[in-house]
Amino acid sequence: MITFLKMHGLGNDFVILDARDPDSGIGADISVRAASLVSDRRRGIGCDQLLIIRPSDNADIFMQILNQDGSVAGACGNGTRCVADYVMRDLDVDQLLIETKSTMLFAERSRIGDADLIAVNMGAARLDWQQVPLAQAQDTLHVDLGADAPALAVCQSMGNPHAVMFVDDVAAIDLDAIGPKLEHADIFPDRANISIVQKLDDAKFRMRVWERSVGITQACGSGACAVGVAAHRRGLAGRLSEIVMDGGSVIIEWRDNGTAGGEVIMTGPVTYVGHGVLDDAISALFGTHHAKA
């Protein structure tokens, strides 16, 4: 029997499995079949990403991130806030170090006005073309994604590849049509997350996002980080900005720590939806004997 938690960060929703207990019933590897079934909104619980909390020798926890299609993601900003809040409540602490496939993330409780929020240090923005990665040497401030792109892209990695395009009106862009084409553009050997962004004022941007392996989502935390970084790199904003997504806003601060990539702090809310127990037949797919299924 495996229990699950359903949470979302600004509409970017997650099924969370806690595998810290060795008797959790969750194996070391999650099959594509298991991840896809749980993520399915008709045949499973439904989510943008499946998050598995595991023990870590290097941090308080390890967070495994799987997309709807079972592929591995290196970062998930909204999911990190959700997992951080859940584990901090469980451990009765206000700070947490989280290991992911890509990096170490530091999370802590924060407050802006009357809002109780979670702030996550998402680490450095990776700005070189090899780090995104791109298929060939490029100026990552002005990347031509071809005829389907509404503007030259600013590309960087926040643990996963991001392409950010600034336009006059995000509502005029058919993201459903161009998102999958740009995700699979030849310049991205690992595909990319695609963000279309409109400047609202000097420190506020409207963003819509096509997430790699998922599609259009209500919000993307690592994408919002990429937008804040791209806005400053293009000279459109300072180092502190509000990113407004379909599901709501986060605050992004790109701190100058003396390195090219600096460190990106994302602050935003989390929401608990519910919890339950997976059916025995679905739980069995997460056992070690089904790891290669």
Image (spheres, rainbow, N blue to C red):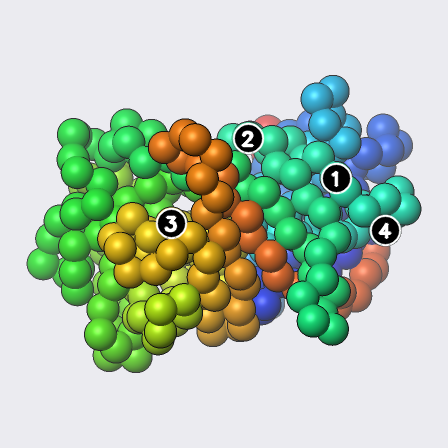
Residue 21 in the image, given as x and y percentages of width and height: 86, 33
Which numbered mark, 2 or 3, is in the foreground of this view? 3
Which of the marked residues, 4 or 2, is nearer the chain's N terminus? 4
Q: Amino acid at mark 1?
A: Leu
Q: Quadrant of the C terminus?
A: top right
Pointer 3 local density, CA inside 10 Å: few below 14, some 14–19, many at least 20: many
Q: Which mark is residue 96?
A: 1
Identified at 60% across, 31% down, the residue is 104
Pointer 4 local density, CA inside 10 Å: few below 14, some 14–19, many at least 20: few
Say what secondary structure mark 1 lies in: strand
Task: Please state if 71 lies on the left or on the right of 154 as rendered.
Answer: right
In depth, the one of 266 and 9 nearer the eye is 266
Labels 4 & 1 near each other (Cβ < 8 A): no
Residue pointed to by mark 3: 229
Labels 2 & 3 near each other (Cβ < 8 A): no
In depth, the one of 247 and 289 nearer the eye is 247
Q: Amino acid at mark 3?
A: Val
Which of the marked residues, 3 or 1, is nearer the chain's N terminus? 1
* Structural distance between the alpha carbons of marks 4 and 1: 11 Å
Task: Please say if 267 is above or below 62.
Answer: below
Task: Please state if 208 lies on the left or on the right of 147 as rendered.
Answer: right
Identified at 26% across, 55% down, the residue is 235
Task: Please state if 96 lies on the left or on the right of 3 as rendered.
Answer: left
Residue 275 falls in which quadrant of the image? Answer: bottom right
Residue 19 in the image, given as x and y percentages of width and height: 78, 37
* Structural distance between the alpha carbons of marks 2 and 1: 14 Å
Q: Amino acid at mark 2?
A: Thr
Say what secondary structure mark 3 lies in: helix
Residue 28 falls in which quadrant of the image? Answer: top right
Q: Is residue 269 visible?
A: yes
Pointer 2 local density, CA inside 10 Å: few below 14, some 14–19, many at least 20: some
